[in-house]
Amino acid sequence: QVLLVESGGGAVQAGVSLRLSCAASGRTLSYYRMAWFRQAPGKEREFVAAINRSGGSTYYTDSAKGRFTISRDNAKNTVYLQMNGLKPEDTAVYYCAADVNSGITYDPLRYEYWGQGTQVTVSS
């Protein structure tokens, strides 16, 4: 079992960058494929980015491509989401998620463990 805690969110102006972190405790993070999801008010939770166990493969939703980068440091038991060029439509609660299986997936139903989320608010 793994416990996930996100941090790094905040209220920012459009165009700036934020780096979200997801720290894991319990079982070592290298056992898990990881992903970031987000949920805006009144909307369903949506996939943002995913990374496999080793960090060698990543996958992004179209709106994140070229602006966001997911990475992981298994030695630090932490996954990151670097977000550049933030837009008001990026406003949401961002969640990290973990799943013990190999490979990579954008399906939230495949992820067993979730953090509590961190709020990102982008104003124009």
Image: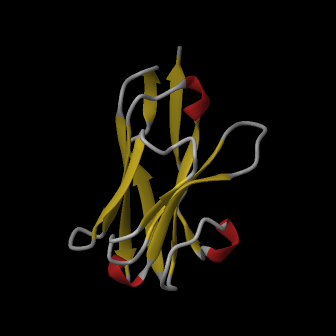
Image coordinates for residue 39, horizontal then vertical, percent: 66, 45
Q: Is residue 49 above or below residue 7?
A: below
Left or right: 93, with 51 as reference point: right
Q: Nearer the viewer, residue 77 or 59?
A: 59
Note whether 44 is above or below 86 in the view shown: below
Q: Residue furthest top?
A: 124
Examine the rendered structure and indicate whether residue 67 appears above or below residue 123. Answer: below
Q: Is residue 21 visible?
A: no
Q: Quadrant of residue 111?
A: bottom right
Q: Position of residue 44 (x, y in %)?
A: 75, 49
| 71 lies left or right of 92 | left
Q: Is residue 104 left or right of residue 78?
A: right
Tell me if residue 5 can be seen: yes
Residue 64 spot, x, y in % from top left? 51, 44
Front residue of 21 and 88 = 88
Q: What residue lies at 46% left-to-right and 69% top-to-bottom?
A: 34
